[in-house]
Amino acid sequence: MIHQGSCHCGRIAFEADTEIETVMECNCSHCARKGYLLHFMPREKLRLTTPEANLSTYTFNKHAIKHRFCEICGCAPFGEAVDPKRGHTVALNVRCIPALDLVTLKVKQVDGRSL
Ligand SMILES: [Zn+2]
């Protein structure tokens, strides 16, 4: 299924070819502040429909994950990193997919704060 998502102002927009059933909610200092609900998928299944240059990037800790966000409206649609096992992986913030009914999703709580 193709899901269409974007930041609030539309400067970052994407199509994600994936099935979204379970999402991850993490309580670490970064995820909790942004309120992410994350779905993991291969990077090649995410197609940007706006220029790559519109992505701003935040990194912290080991600076391995590129947390992408829009510098105009502040929304953070996804993060990406190269995982040794899974390859180039995206953590999609499903809150940026307006047509997705979030109450139908299973939410897996991850205790990232204790890791
Ligand atoms: Zn924006």
Image: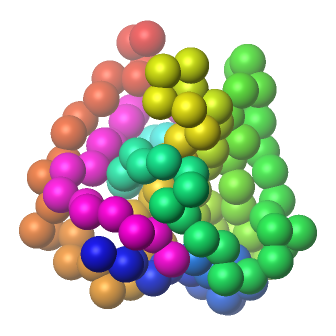
Q: What stretch is highlighted in magenta?
A: 15-30
Color encoding of the figure: rainbow
Quick check: can you spot residue 95? no
Q: Which of 76 and 50 is in front in this view?
A: 50
Q: Residue at 51% of width from left, 77% of height from top? A: 15
* Quadrant position of residue 68: bottom right
Name the spot of residue 71 as percent of width and height, x first.
Answer: 81, 69
Q: In which quarter of the image is the C terminus?
A: top left
Q: Residue at 49% of width from left, 61% of height from top? A: 45
* Quadrant position of residue 105: bottom left
Q: Which of 75 and 88 is in front in this view?
A: 88
Q: Nearer the viewer, residue 32 or 105?
A: 105
Q: Which of 111 and 5 is in front in this view?
A: 5
Most extreme residue toward the right is: 53
User: Vertical placement of 38 versus 109: above or below?
Assistant: below
Q: Residue at 31% of width from left, 43% of height from top? A: 24
Name the spot of residue 30 as percent of width and height, x first.
Answer: 57, 37
Name the spot of residue 77 as percent of width and height, x first.
Answer: 57, 64
